[in-house]
Image (spheres, rainbow, N blue to C red):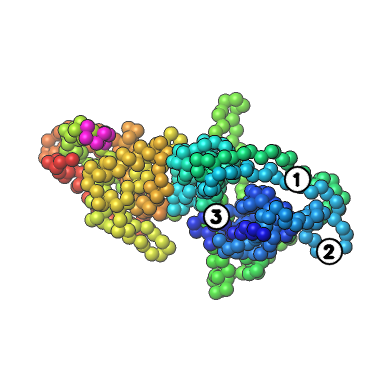
Amino acid sequence: MALIDVIMPQMGESIAEGTISKWHKKVGDKVAKDETLLEISTDKVDSEIPAPAAGVIAELLFQETTTVGVNTVIARINTDANAAVNAPAAALAAPAPAASKPAAAAPAPAPAAPAPVVSGGALIDVIMPQMGESIAEGTITKWHKKVGDKIAKDETLLEISTDKVDSEIPAPAAGVLAEILFKEQTTVGVNTVIAKIASGSGAVVTAAPSAPAPVAAPAAAPAPAVHAPVAHHAAEAVPSDRFYSPLVLNIARTEGVSMSELEAIPGSGANGRVSKNDILAYVQKKRSGGVPSVPAPKPSAPAYTAPKPAAPITYPAGRVEIIKMDTMRKAIAEHMVRSKHTSAHVGSLSEADLTGIVKFREKHKAAFEKREGFNLTYTPFFLEAVVKAIKDFPMMNSSVDGDTIIIRKDVNLGVAVALENGLIVPVIKNAEQKNLAGIARSLNDLATRARNKKLMPDEVTGGTFTVTNPGGFGNLYGFPIINQPQVAILGVGAIKKRPVVIDDAIAIRSMVYISMSYDHRIIDGALGGMFMQKVVHYLENFDVTQAI
C-alpha cells in the first residue's frame, strides 16, 4: 500500500498555520488528483486545497475547525489501485446530529478526469515563485505551453502577475509538460506547485480519455440534510456586511468574544478584514482589562452597514469605456492608500545647479556609450548624490517598526521604472559600494529587465530609500508617496535652463528641482532639510575632472 501525505500548505511567507474549515471527502472516499479535498482558512486567505494524488482517503488526521501548523501532515491518500472504496451511499452521507432517517439516495459523483499518463522521465515540480518579500500569491496570466509540449530549460513557461511585478517564469528543467495544475487568471499562493515537467529526452505524455463532469445531487430532494458543519456557515449567519474567516470566528467562540465586540475590532487586513493577529490582540487587551465592555445590541437595532454614496456614478450609455483594474493596478492603489495612512507625509522642495554635470555628461556620453553599450542618463548622478547624503544622515535609511526605529547599514536604492500599465521599483543593492559607472550599469540592467519582465524576486525587495523621476515626463517637480516601509522618497524634476543670479550677475544655468516626501514620525523638518541640502551640495560640487 502506497500512502501519500497531504500537508497543510503555507499560504504566505508570514503564515504559520491554517484552519481546516471543511473536508470535501471522508475516509474511504475515492479522490482524483487535483480534485478539491478540503478548504482551509488563514489570517490572509481562504483557499481550496487539491488532492496531491489520485486514490482513496486512508486517514483524516484533524477534524474541521482545527488549526494546524504549516507543513503538518493532515491526511493520507492510498494510491494503491486495489484500495477499498466506500459504497456510493456512504460516500455521500453528510454529518448530521441524528441518524434516525436514512439519507436519500443520490447519484455518486463521477470520477474526475484522470491525470495525463507520463512515461520516461522524473517529474519536476514548477512552483509559484515569491516575487517579493511581502508577496503571498501570484496570478497566472498566460501559459506559453500546453500539456504534452516539449520545453527547454529556461524557456518561458508562463507569465504571472503580482501586486509588485509582472514576470515571465522560465522552465526549471527541460522535458515535456506533463501537467498544468491551475488555469489562466487563477491566483495561487507562493511555493504552490502549479505544473509538472517530465524531465529527460525520452519523456512522453499521453493524454488520458476525458471523463464526464461530476453529477450534482438533485436540487429538489425532499428534506435535504445539512451538508456542512456549523462553523463553515458561521460567517454567513453574521448580521453584518463584514466578512470574518472561519479561523477568526473559531477564536471568537473559544475566547467568548461576542459579535458586537467582533464588529468593533478595527481590522488590519484587506478591506478592513479582521485578521488572526487583530482578534488575538483584542483578547489579550480584554484579559488585561484594557478593553471596555461592549453592550449587547438591542434586538430592534439594525446591523451596521457601510454608508452608501449620496449619488451613484452616472454616465450616458455608450459614451464611456469601462476598464477593469489588473492585478498590478489594484496593488498599486492599495499600496499608495496604505502608505498615506501609515506615514505622516511631509514634503520639501529644493533646487540644484547641474551646469557642471550637464557639461561633464555631454563631454563623456559618446565614449561611455561606445564602451558600455548604453546611454549615460542623468539619473546615476542623482543616485550617487543620494548615497553620499545618506552616509551623512543614516536616519534617512531607516524604517519604523512600532515604537522602534531600524537604521539600515546597507544602502539599497529603489528606482521607480515606468511600465506600460503601471510602475515597478527594482532595487540597486549595496549602492554605497558602487561608483558612478557601477550605479549606471546596475540601473540600466534593472530598468531594461523590468520593462522586459525579466526581474528576479530579490531584485524588487529590500529597498531602503527610493528615487523617482517625474522629470522624465517633462514635469518640473512632484511630491511622490513613500514606498513602505521606507521613510523617504526623493523626486527628480526636469532639467531646464533658467536665468539665475550668481554673485549679483544673471547667468543661464541648467537647473533642476528636487522634491522629497518623508515620514514626519521620525524625520523632522530640520533633518529632512539638511539631507536635501547635502544632496544639492554633492550635485553642485560634482568632480568634473574624474574619469568615468
Q: Is residue 51 magenta?
A: no
Residue 230: image quadrant is bottom right
Quadrant location of the C terminus in the rendered image: top left
Residue 51 point in image, percent of width and height: 64, 52
Cα separation, mark 1 vs mark 2, equals 28 Å
Q: What stretch is highlighted in magenta?
A: 370-377
Crowding near pointer 2: few (<14 within 10 Å), some, many (20+)?
few
Residue 119 point in image, percent of width and height: 58, 44
Question: Looking at the picture, does residue 422 appear above or below residue 388?
Answer: above
Q: Is mark 3 on a helix, strand or loop?
A: loop
Q: Nearer the viewer, residue 269 or 158?
A: 158
On the question of residue 274 being in view, the answer is no
Please state if 409 lies on the left or on the right of 328 as rendered: left
Q: Look at mark 2 in the image and give the residue it sits on.
A: 98
Badge 2 amino acid: Ala
Q: What element carries label 2?
A: loop
Cα separation, mark 3 vs mark 1, equals 30 Å
Q: Look at mark 3 in the image and give the residue it sits on.
A: 11
Q: Look at mark 1 in the image and give the residue it sits on.
A: 110
Q: What element carries label 1?
A: loop
Badge 3 amino acid: Met
Name which residue lies at 23% across and 33% down.
Answer: 369
Instruction: Choose the circle earlier in sequence order: 3 or 1.
Output: 3
